[in-house]
Amino acid sequence: LCKAMKDILGDKVDKVQVGTRITDSPCVLVTSEHGWSANMERIMKAQALRDSSMSTYMTSKKTMEINPAHPIMAELRRRVEADKGDKTVKDLVWLLFETSLLTSGFSLEEPTSFASRINRMIMLGLSIDEDELPEAAPADLPALEPTADSKTTSMEEVD
């Protein structure tokens, strides 16, 4: 499971390992002992006089620790063993990563993709098929009201 999660997350995490200190949550993100904390990373991102080269060392190396006793991780492991390429598994791994980012105090790089993943999971939980979604209807705009004299506008009347 750790290897599959690391493959899905790529360079977003330094490594994925089994944590021994986690009790309630399925996973947490931790930084190295000498790495930047979430608060320091947020402060450095807000600096006005920073250059683009700072972003390479600015982001801390994050380690994802998973809780093997948590039911979410047990089910995720079962699904990874069944099919590593399952889109739902990838969405769940990304959701776990992004929620652990938020709970650890970091900020999301792409909040819109997080929101779309949450919406997909809600639809899955409610057994709504993506094909059942209505097409985006154009917003109905009210018709323009014709004026008595189309050459004269209310601004011209004031002048």
Image (tube, rainbow, N blue to C red):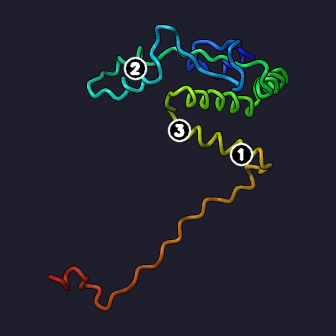
Tell me the CA gap for discs 2 and 1.
34 Å
Q: Earlier in the sequence, mark 3 or mark 2?
A: 2
**Three-letter amino acid code at disc 1?**
Ile
Q: In the image, is 33 to the left or to the right of 99?
A: left
Mark 1: few, some, or many residues within 10 Å (few <14, many ≥20)? few
Q: Residues within 10 Å of mark 3 (few under 14, many from 20)?
A: few
Contact? badges 3 and 1 (CB < 8 Å): no
* Sequence-earlier tag: 3 or 1: 3
The disc labelled 3 sits on which kind of residue?
Pro
Circle 1 — which element?
helix
CB-based contact (under 8 Å), mark 3 and mark 2: no
Q: Residue at x 73, y 49 (%)?
A: 130
**Quadrant for the C terminus in the image:** bottom left
To which residue does mark 3 refer?
111
Image location (x, y in percent) of residue 8: 66, 22
Q: Is residue 148 above or below residue 130?
A: below
Residue highlighted by disc 2: 55
